[in-house]
Image: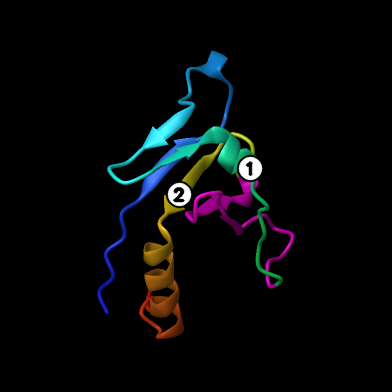
C-alpha cells in the first residue's frame, strides 16, 4: 500500500517551561488542553512492562498516540483521521509485519 503519514509532535507541559500552547499544521491545530483532556486507552494485550502506546480520539477528529512511560511530558504524535485510517488498513493487511 505504501502509506505516507504526515506527523505533528506536540509536548505537554506548562507555559513556564516554554512549551507551545498550540501546535499548527497547514490544515489544523491541536491545543495542549485537547490532549490533556482526551480519554487515552491502550491495548488489552499490553503488559505491565511499560512498553506500550496509548491512543486517543482528540476533540476535532484527530488521533493522538503517546508512549505510556512518559504520559505527562512526552511527545504526542497527532494524525488526521484519514491518516490513522490508512495506518489501520496497513496493519490489518500486514504492511508492517516485517518491521
* Position of residue 52 measured from the top left corner of the image (x, y, whole percent): 61, 59
Q: Which mark is residue 3?
A: none
Disc 2 to disc 1: CB gap under 8 Å: no
Asked if residue 97 can be seen in this view, the reply is no
- Left or right: residue 74 versus residue 83 is right
Tell me which residue sits at (52%, 52%) in the image. 64
Residue 67 inside the magenta-drawn segment: yes
Q: Label 1: state its secondary structure.
A: loop
Tell me which residue sits at (63%, 39%) in the image. 36
- Residue nearest the viewer, comparing 35 with 52: 35
Q: Which mark is residue 71?
A: 1
Asked if residue 26 can be seen in this view, the reply is yes
* Position of residue 35 measured from the top left corner of the image (x, y, whole percent): 58, 42
Residue tagged 2: 77
Q: Label 2: state its secondary structure.
A: strand
Q: Which residues are magenta?
A: 45-69
Amino acid at each position: 500500500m505504501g502509506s505516507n503519514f504526515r506527523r505533528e509532535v506536540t509536548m505537554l507541559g506548562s507555559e513556564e517551561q516554554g512549551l507551545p500552547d498550540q501546535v499548527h499544521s497547514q490544515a489544523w491545530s491541536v491545543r495542549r488542553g485537547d490532549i490533556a483532556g482526551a480519554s487515552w486507552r491502550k491495548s488489552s494485550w499490553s503488559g505491565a512492562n511499560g512498553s506500550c502506546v496509548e491512543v486517543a480520539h482528540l476533540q476535532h477528529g484527530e488521533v493522538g498516540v503517546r508512549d505510556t512511560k512518559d504520559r505527562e511530558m512526552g511527545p504526542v504524535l497527532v494524525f488526521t483521521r484519514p491518516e490513522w485510517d490508512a495506518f489501520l488498513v496497513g496493519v490489518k493487511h500486514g504492511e508492517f509485519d516485517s518491521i
